[in-house]
Image (tube, rainbow, N blue to C red):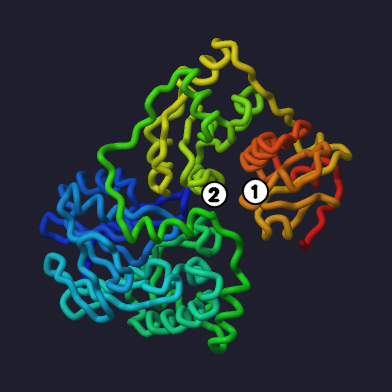
Amino acid sequence: MSTVDVLPLVDEGLGNSAYLADLGDGRALVVDVSLDLRAARRAAARRGLRLAFAADTHLHADFVSGARQLAATDGARVLASAAGRREYRHDGLRDGDETDVGGLRLRALFTPGHTHEHLSFLLLDGAAPVGVFTGGSLIVGAAARTDLVHPALTDELARRQYASLRRLASLPDEVAVWPTHGAGSFCSAPPGARRTSTIGAEKATNSLLHAENEDAFVAALLGSLGSFPSYFRELADTNRRGLVLPGDPVLPGLDVDRVRALAADGAVVVDARPAADFAAGHVPGALSIPLRPAFASWLGWLVPADRPIVVVRGGDQDPAEIAWQAVKIGRTGLAGELDGGLAAWTAAGQPVRRTPVVTADGIGGRPVLDVRQDGEFAAGHLPGARHRELGRLDGHELPREPLVVMCGHGERAMSAASLLEQAGHRDVTVVLAGGPADWARATGNALVTGA
């Protein structure tokens, strides 16, 4: 068995893995790498490798592909599905096509389902299959969702996913499985799942591969689907065109007057500071999205692509990290950051808004709005709690009554409170520490399950 060195490059926030394969001749292949190429470049530099090939399994719904960027800056050869009709130079591959990558071979396997043009890539050393980059087809313990292309195609794509998984399962048991989507991805990987696997392990443990028939598979797959960030639907077109950055993204400093003018003209002020700092004081109308691994997902979900972004950050937060998190999911309209942060805003005599906070045991009898995902809410929530997922929250639809907003830890609740504030709600309190389980422990009361 070959010992080809394949390194996963995990994006914990998006729940995805890119892969860097050392081809043994000073060159490397990267698979499903995002526009944030920092990790890939660091890994290649440590090994003395040149990024020579960039393969994409599908028109990603999660992030902007870095393939065109690598072609422009590194001369990388881009390998992708011919059915994706990318509008830039690439090798358009069809089922069975093989590419020599430094003595190894990469064979395209047409595996539609997650998307209509999806390819998997089987890596061969001579005649021996080493591993398969499965993208959003077979993933550890599951298969990726099939409702991203268009609602009317969900069932059809689920049936194609069934056939694709059966095809992949016919590979030898020892073949490594290198999926793109993993735990934490909105593309349906089970929580806590391992990032990589083997065909044999998946045949033994993946319940979808044990489905009695196609109809049972479709029912199980579609029954597991929750909501997904709205920006997912934008990125197929973005990746079809390809995106090249003129340089590393930056956040230019903006003075208070410029921030006020931009906000008045439709820019979104995104406050990336911790939720507690936002609660203590923030620019009126700002959207709270604390900088953490999930920052990119919520930025893409809550901020429309056509709105310029002005950032407010803490002095200990890295502006480059904020900028990269934004551009990798297609939010390239970065107007800049408030120079001097909130201190500059207050020093200029501008008004500051504060958000009251409580702990889980301090809710009392006040009405509760729970903004967690549907599955989280169904697993256990406060009696009488109203439910709106954060990604579907429309503050204009809710009555202007006092509300206590909660999630699991406080960050999503603070984002929701800032959206409610934008919609004119003024009596909003946030549970900043803890969630329903903490409330149950503190009060001795039982949670309610079900929707």
Q: Residue at x 33, y 76 (%)?
A: 174
Going from the N terminus, do you reach mark 2 or mark 1 first?
2
Depth order, front residue of 92/363: 92
Q: In which quadrant of the rendered image does the C terminus lie?
A: bottom right
- Which label belongs to residue 5? none
Q: Residue at x 50, y 57 (%)?
A: 185
Secondary structure at numbered mark 2: helix
Q: Residues within 10 Å of mark 1 (few under 14, many from 20)?
A: many
Residue 391 point in image, percent of width and height: 61, 51
The residue wearing badge 1 is 390
Depth order, front residue of 424/282: 424
Identity of the amino acid at label 1? Answer: Leu
Residue 426 point in image, percent of width and height: 76, 31
Image-based side of 438 in relation to 73, left or right: right
Seen as rendered, the residue at the extreme bottom is: 213
Q: In which quadrant of the rendered image does the N terminus lie?
A: bottom left
Residues at marks 2 and 1, CA–CA distance in whole angstroms: 9 Å
Instruction: Mark yes or no: residue 381 visible.
Output: yes
Secondary structure at numbered mark 1: helix
Residue 372 point in image, percent of width and height: 67, 51
Q: Residue at x 60, y 15 (%)?
A: 350
Q: Are marks 2 and 1 in contact (CB under 8 Å)?
A: yes
Q: How many marks?
A: 2
Depth order, front residue of 109/236: 236
Q: Is residue 414 above or below residue 202?
A: above
Q: Is residue 343 above or below residue 170?
A: above
Q: Is residue 245 above or below residue 380?
A: above
Image-based side of 393 in relation to 168, left or right: right
Residue 196 point in image, percent of width and height: 40, 64
Instruction: Mark yes or no: residue 272 visible.
Output: no
The residue wearing badge 2 is 301
